[in-house]
Each structure stands twice: as structure tokens, then as C-alpha cells.
Amino acid sequence: SGLATATYLAGAAGDGPRVSVVDERSDDVLLARAESLRALGVAVELGTSNVPDADMIVASPGIPPTSALMRAARSLGVPMIAELELAFRVSRSPFIAVTGTNGKTTTTNLIAHLLAEAGMPNRAVGNIGPPVISVVTEVGAETHLVAEVSSFQLALTERFHPNVAVLLNITPDHLDWHGSMDAYSADKGRIFDNLTSEDLAIIGVDDEYSLRWARDVTARGLEVCEVSLRSHAGRGARVEDDMLVVTVGGQRLELVYASELRLRGTHNVTNALAAAAAAVFVGAEPEAVRSGLRSFEPLAHRLEPVGVVDGVEYFNDSKATNPDAVVKALTGFTGRRVVVLLGGRGKQTDFGPLASAVVAHGAAAVLFGEAREELARAFSGSDAVVAICPTLDGAVREAASAAGPGDAVLLSPACASFDEFQGYAHRGEAFRAAVAALGFEGGEL
């Protein structure tokens, strides 16, 4: 998003802004990007925390607020915004914004899929794909921008005003960045700051923190669609006798049976309800929503089936980078023995509830990566752990040894990937390759 922002600003017509870029790091990739930006007239400084004088700062969402670079930027006392905020200010398109600890990418993709099924122009942007700022000049008021937005981005918004704001859930994650659950929740809740009576807030209410936001937004007199798998109240979005039911703007729609969805896990039923509510609110025809819900396929790295070796089915859920995501993933394997791969780089979250959930499910666990010993302590006294490995590749082999025909091996790590990999997608590809290697060795590839 930083590169896209600098490129956009450098291309401003006429006497555009003076653009400077600063990054604390300096590597071959950044050096190449720096040269491309300098060719556009951008001043670039790498390997420094010194920030030049500016009238406004656009901060990359990946920079921790406690870093030397952010402290230097804030010391200037000028407005600091996110790329998302800048894009909104220059865009003509209506926004559907999706946030939450888990399920953002699936829900954002699903909303875009439902709108496309209804013949409504849209672009999926933000964390899900192209930065918003790189798209806003390409589309007009007829195109919905379906934006996956993180707490990091929302923390630096002021005027950002989606017509539909979706908050799926708030459970412990990124506490190393935000410092506390209250601070994390406050940044998530900024998605509702500028909503009016003509907009819709769609809020999952099955966890404590997002339920608080539902009450707060309702108290402001705004329209709220509560999404719940626990409540059977005759409003919001819910499941009745396996049927997904959405009530928006006083209109009650029966959509599809949960069993018709191609997505695994009860959490994906919640995601489907939220996506359907958003699509219906902005004008998608109910039959198109039904068709889209039935046809939507699982995404890469999100409970993605990647192969069967010796009767064992392997699933890539590398995007599950916090404990709650793993707990939700396990709901997709009720009645089936699972060997779950847990590990990577921890984010100062409590692994105790995760260990309890794994044991309660009857799953076996293989622990790997930097967090393996911390995870092992959480499983202390349990016989669920079958192996502890330094690397993912070794963990896959251990899981294959522990699994039998009919079992599932699930990479759902509960941790960040940066101890071994460049990101969760890189980790997922490595898992897929390791499973393929098992198949090759077993003669089943």
C-alpha cells in the first residue's frame, strides 16, 4: 500500500504534492522500488527513521505504533492517515467495508461474488488484493468497492464512511501491536464512526467485544443487522432449521440451506450470512444471492483441500493466524479425527483455550516453529501432542505418521508465519508442496 500511495501521489496532475518516502529497512527489493519511485520524482530514504517535514503523513499499516519511525512521524504534529483514508477521500465509489479478527477475506470475496452474480459492478480491494488507492481512479460511482480492512488501517482513518460496515468478530489477536484487547476493539470499531441512518452495520454478536459494538451502534439509532448462530430472534441474520435467513430493511429472506454451502465450518455459515445481508442491502436480487451462495468455492489457504495421501485428507488453513481461527476451523471436522499442525511465530496470545479446544475435539497436535515450546506448555498434562518439530516440513511428515485412513491433517497454525516464511500464503504453498512430496513418495501423486 505504501508503494501504491507514493505512485498515486507522484502522478497528481499539475503542481502536485511533494512526495517523500521513508523506510527503516533497506534490502534489494526496496532498493529496486526506490529507483522506480525516484524516476517519478519521489524522494526516497531507506534505512533511516528520520522523517522530513510534511503537511500530511500516510503511514503503512504494517508499521507498529511503537516503532522509531512512527514516533518520529508523530513528533511532527501533522495529520497522519492510512492509505485507506486517502483512497476514500479521492474515490467516487460506494464502499462495503469488512473487518473482524477472522473471516474477513472469505466474507469480502463472497460479497464480491454475490454482487457479480447479481450483475452489479464491484472490485474486491484492500488486504484482499490491490490497495484501494490503486483502483479508485479506474472505477466510478457505479462500482462498489468491497474492501477488506484491518485494525491497523482503521486506526488511521478520520472521514472513512462505508455504506455497509461489517464487523464479523473480535477475538484476541495482534496484541503485540495494539497492546490490549480494549485498544484492538476500539480500532476495529472505527469502521462505524461515520455511518448515518442511510447506512447499514452488520455485526456478529456471538462474542463479547463485537456484541458491545452492536449495542453501541444500535444506541446511536443506526440500522444494525445482528448476525448470530446462537440467537433465534426474528431479526438480523441467523439459521432456522438449517436455512440461512436474513432480515434487512424489514424484508425477511430465506436463502439457502447451510448444507448447500461449499464452505466448511460453522464460522463460514456466519460469514455467508454477513455477506448475504450486505449484498441484499445494496440491491442484489435474492435469487442471485442464493445462486452465489451455492456456487462460492473455498479460498486458497482457508480450509483449502490440497490432496489425499494414503487415505488421509490434507487441508491448508494457513490463514488461521490466531487461536480463535483454529477453534472455528475444527468445527468443520466434527466426528472426524484430526491431526492439527500448530506453530510459527506467536503474537502474545494465550494458547490455553486453544489447547483445551483441541483436546475437547479429540484432535492430535504437531507443534512446530518458534512458538512450539510455548504451545507445548499450553498442552502440558495432555497426551494430545504427538510430536514437536522445528520446521513445518518436519511437522507435515510427523502428522502423516500419526494419521490413518479417513483422518484429516489440518494446517491451522494459530501463529504468524514470519519465523520461517514471508507470509501466510508462502507458508500455505510450502505445506502444499510438502503434501505433494508425501504423495510422490507414496506413489499417489
Image (spheres, grey):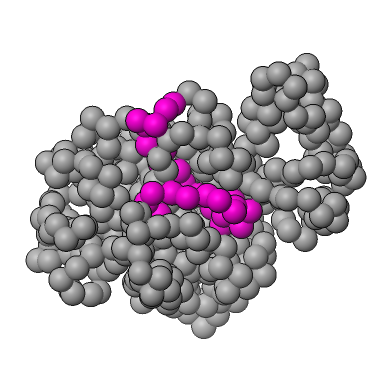
x, y (%) of residue 389? 59, 58
Where is residue 211, by image quadrant? bottom left
x, y (%) of residue 130? 52, 33
Report the number of numbered marks.
0
Q: Nearer the viewer, residue 313 or 111?
A: 111
Q: Nearer the viewer, residue 338 or 144?
A: 144
x, y (%) of residue 131? 55, 35
x, y (%) of residue 307? 34, 40
Residue for point 47% across, 67% down: 170
Q: Is residue 32 left or right of residue 243?
A: right
Q: Which region of the structure is painted magenta?
A: 139-165
Q: Quadrant of the C terminus?
A: top left
Q: Is residue 92 left or right of residue 294?
A: right
Residue for point 14% across, 45% down: 286
Can see residue 159? Answer: yes
Residue for point 37% across, 51% down: 164
Q: Is residue 15 left or right of residue 365?
A: right
